[in-house]
Image (cartoon, grey):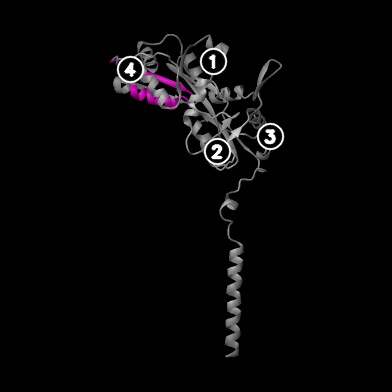
Amino acid sequence: MKNSKILSIIALVLMLTMVFVGCSKETPSGDEAAEFDLNKDITVVARDAASGTRGAFHEIMKIIVKENDTEVDKLVVGALEFDGTDKVITAVEGDEYGIGYISLGSVSDRIKAVSVNGVEPTVENVKSGNYTVSRPFLLVTKGNESDLVKDFLKFTESTEGQKITNEMNFIGYVDSPADYTASGMSGTIKVAGSTSVAPLMEKLQEAYQELNPDVTFETQAQGSSQGIKAAIDGSYDVGMSSRELKEEEAKELNRHVLAIDGIAVIVNKENPKSDLASEDITKVYKGEITKWSEVK
């Protein structure tokens, strides 16, 4: 009997010990678990070198600098570079300490778009000029456009085309667009270029095909540089660019402004930062600021 009582006491002690140890190992709840560590390194996310978004953003933010009359991109070594908008979004969405940049029209609730110098990245602020991180969306052609291509370009600048542009949170460029009348044409239009322009282009193509069902499109989106090159060499009818043309490119192409777009600076939704100074953004992308605690 005595041995039985001793065993029972030992078992009770072991059970209580396990309970206390288990409690001590529980994951902190609430704010403790979700606390953002400002001393963590910033994960810098950028677009690939062929991207018009990168070219425009790096120029606006002075990440591209001139050295001995040569433009040099000072993007920090080790930055993650992606060849598409959604890949940038996915990278920042999955990294609590990430920062990236995308077209304003591509902003979603997957990430957080921050203000720059106290100004929110909205269509209204881009229109007013208060939000200065913006660039044109261009369609470029060789200058020997077919009647079909001319008709499609006419549609993009029409009341119907500009309505689609505005509905997608881009800014229509045409002040007084005219109504479009279906042409009844047939044929194929080949389009290549910017991944940022591509979602808007897709919607415009769908609307155009509803009015002209005998027209088809062949589209590739691999970056602005691809679209510009394809338009210059004639392998595609229309190039899409999310950056301005360089002087030598402008000499060979016709330039059609499709829309004006803001570039949003994005961070993970867990990041407490909601407003960044442009100076700090530049320093982050050049590697002069490496931790969120250094960001004002």
Q: Which residue is mark 4?
A: 187
Residue at 64 percent across and 38 percent down: it is: 42
SS category of the residue bearing label 1: loop
Of residues 101 and 76, the one nearer the viewer is 101
Quadrant the N terminus occupies = bottom right
Question: Is label 1 or label 2 in front?
Answer: 2
Q: Which segment did they paint magenta?
A: 184-207
Q: Amino acid at mark 4?
A: Gly
Instruction: Kindly report the distance in space between the C-alpha atoms of the residues bearing marks 3 and 1.
Output: 31 Å
Q: Which residue is mark 1?
A: 245
Instruction: Kindly report the distance in space between the C-alpha atoms of the residues bearing marks 2 and 4.
Output: 41 Å
| Picture layout, residue 111 above or below residue 140 | below
Residue at 60 percent across and 90 percent down: it is: 2
Residue at 68 percent across and 34 percent down: it is: 289
SS category of the residue bearing label 3: loop
x and y percent of residue 202 in the render? 40, 26
Q: Residues within 10 Å of mark 1 (few under 14, many from 20)?
A: some
Q: Amino acid at mark 3?
A: Ile
Q: Which residue is mark 2?
A: 92
